Image: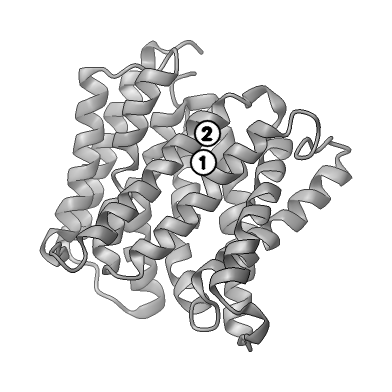
Amino acid sequence: MREARPIDLFLLVLLGLIWGSSFFNIKIATYSYDPFTLALIRVVFASIPLFLLCKYKNIKIEAFSKNWKPYALIGLCNIAIPFTLIAIGTAKINSYLAAMLMSTTPMSGSILAHFFTKDEKITLLKSIGILIGFLGVFFLFFDKVIINESNYIYVLITILGSTFYSIGGILTLKLRTKGNENVTTSTTLWSVIFLFPLSMIFETPWQLSPSIDSTLALLYLGVVATGLAWMIRFRILTVNGLVFQTQVAYLIPIFGVLFGYFLMNEIITWRVLISLIIIILGIYIVKKNNKGLKK
């Protein structure tokens, strides 16, 4: 792992921008698609260009080779399980609470990285940076967050879903030498296999009559917010480590608010600006902590 350079920070911001824009596209897609079917078609749309990219670059796809098990496990833990849990959890809680709960990913990532990696141990400086980043998100949404007896189960389900992203990140690091295109394509193909029965058993996708807008939104979610985004994530993971990569969870709600301003005429308040400053400070502290990492 190395200290974050300008290109690494750019990719982290780009990833936050892509995933921040996903909220609106998910909302549009849900007008026509049920959660499991949405997740399934999303990863199908992601798999097709990734598969074609590998074929164009003559890259071997190891999804179904004799070493298929780690790819299947990552496809399950990194995509299928979190997509499913978060779809279930966020269906019963408001978007503000969901954004805050998803921002727990750097915390779970830091703990898991401490125990399951060699060069991402918890330090005081890193812990302070992660806590400050979370406080930035909390400051943005604290007066809109409601947890009670009717939704606490869904709160726990959402947190568990976000934690699986960290688990998937740890597993992905085990395949860092296998190539970005191969790992991203192979794990996405396996997620299709896992999500297909969920869609068929719990929903009726054959009865859908989707609108063009919903389908275009789903196409964006697949090609850009899954295919391209997971390749960016893999690059950040393998170069800068899990803890740095999970900082994107702090940027996503900020970009969500900015998209609300530009696309839905929502107002950017002083609280948004202060939250952004706090989050940037947290990311900067984590970046400074990484100065001692080998380059």
**Above or below: residue 1 compared with residue 35:** above
Q: Nearer the viewer, residue 116 or 289?
A: 116
Q: Amino acid at mark 1?
A: Leu
Counting residues from the N terminus, which is met first, the one under dot 2 or under dot 1? 1
Crowding at mark 2 (Cα within 10 Å: few <14, some 14-19, many 20+): many
Using the image, tell me which numbered label, if any, was put on residue 236.
2
Query: In the rendered image, which residue does mark 1 sit on?
Result: 11
Q: Nearer the viewer, mark 2 or mark 1?
A: 2
The image position of residue 274, as x and y in percent, is: 17, 52
Marks 2 & 1, CB-CB < 8 Å contact: yes
Real-space Cα distance between discs 2 and 1? 7 Å
Q: Secondary structure at mark 2?
A: helix
Task: Locate residue 287 relative to residue 276 in the image: left or right.
Answer: right
Which residue does the image show at 44% across and 71% down from the upper left? Answer: 24
Which residue does the image show at 41% across and 76% down from the upper left? Answer: 263
Task: Locate residue 12 relative to residue 67 in the image: left or right.
Answer: left
Residue found farthest to the front: 201
Which residue does the image show at 63% across and 70% down from the upper left? Answer: 200
Q: Secondary structure at mark 1?
A: helix
Q: Nearer the viewer, residue 177 or 258?
A: 177
